[in-house]
Image (tube, rainbow, N blue to C red):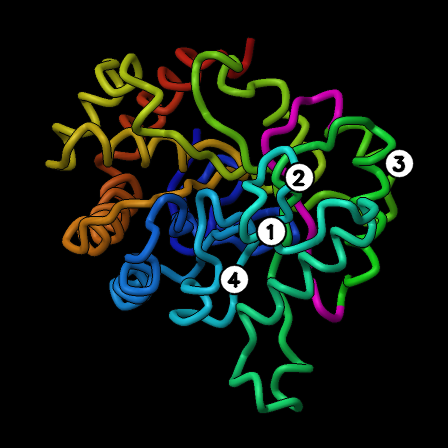
Amino acid sequence: MSALSNGCVSLGKLGSSESNVPVPAFIYGSAWKEKRTAHLVSQALQAGFTAVDTAAQPRHYREDLVGEAVRQLQTKFTPIDGQDLEGLPYRSEDSVADQIRSSVTSSLDHLRAGSADDIAVSSQTYLDCVVLHSPLQTLSETLIAWRTLEEFVPHRIRHLGISNVNLNNLELLYDLMDIKPAIVQNRFYPSNSFDTRLRRFCVENGIVYQAFGVLTQNTFLLESEPVKVLAGEIGTQNQMALYCLILGLENTVVLNGTTNVGRMKSDLCELDRCRRWAATTEHEALWGRLLAHFKALIGDGC
């Protein structure tokens, strides 16, 4: 039976982590916030979020504005086919390795620990994690990109991850690279069978799975029996109950990009309320049954 506890996400628990990478249950997602980015990230941090996701990709992110609000976070390298030509953090004609180096340098500047004039502080700036936004067009280019990112570990980058990846590419990266992926950030939805096999690989190898698109892509799950029963038991909306059940999966956390300041605070409070509800002797068995039903719906254990 799975229990719930405080902290980061862990094996079968909502609230701690068995991987080597401590990651809070909710990560604030800064995509598509445009000019409101700095304000919203600041509000999220004040509300209690302790991790932020951004990217060196001006099309969907304002990494520079995230840097105004926080000086310690996770960012991404986005390949050229995911970028707009205006505002590139590297030169399009450069090699993949040089694009990586330029992008990381840009991110370190945007997210530096102090002012640009404080050389001592800026030289100590590091990124908690850099995520390869997607595999590149060929396996060879993907491996070159990863090896170049390895140059920055551990002094300027603590951990590496990859997004929008399938199981085959993830296994290749894990087998071939010296520094193993610590993070996988994927869309959690029916079209990829909720990444059941890939998430199993993550659990077996101590990789944290970051789920995004949770509320926008899962109408079926939002109306499912375990979600509605849990929402009724803890007195919350179906959206929050779905978050809680996903956070009950092994080594899984959620990107939460709400722009509603009230929801920022209430999501964190209701997550804590769900933890406390599930931890009681009275409700532990029901939580276990609801989580087992939810896992069956998404194909876990099949």
Lower sequence index among marks 1 and 4: 4
Q: Which mark is residue 88?
A: 1
* Measured Cα–Cα span from mark 1 to mark 3: 29 Å
Asked if residue 162 is among those painted magenta in the image, a careful observer would answer yes
Q: Splitting the image into 4 quarters, where does residue 158 fall?
A: bottom right
Residue sitting at x 63%, y 76%: 125
Lower sequence index among marks 2 and 3: 2
* Measured Cα–Cα span from mark 2 to mark 4: 23 Å
Residue sitting at x 25%, y 32%: 241
Lower sequence index among marks 1 and 3: 1
Q: Residue 285 versus residue 58: which sits nearer the camera?
A: 58
In the image, residue 243 sits, relative to residue 128, either above or below, namely: above
* Measured Cα–Cα span from mark 3 to mark 4: 27 Å
Which residue is tagged 3? 176
Lower sequence index among marks 1 and 2: 2
In the image, residue 23 sits, relative to residue 82, either above or below, namely: below
Which residue is tagged 4? 73
Asked if residue 74 is among those painted magenta in the image, a careful observer would answer no
Q: Are marks 1 and 2 in contact (CB under 8 Å)?
A: yes
Which residue is tagged 2? 80
Tell me if mark 2 has few (under 14), some (14-19) or many (20+) residues whose alpha carbon lies within 10 angstroms of its own: some
Q: Residue 73 versus residue 6: which sits nearer the camera?
A: 73
Disc 2 vs disc 3: which is toward the camera? 2
Q: Position of residue 229 (x, y in %)?
A: 18, 22
Give the magenta-colored segment's residue range. 155-169
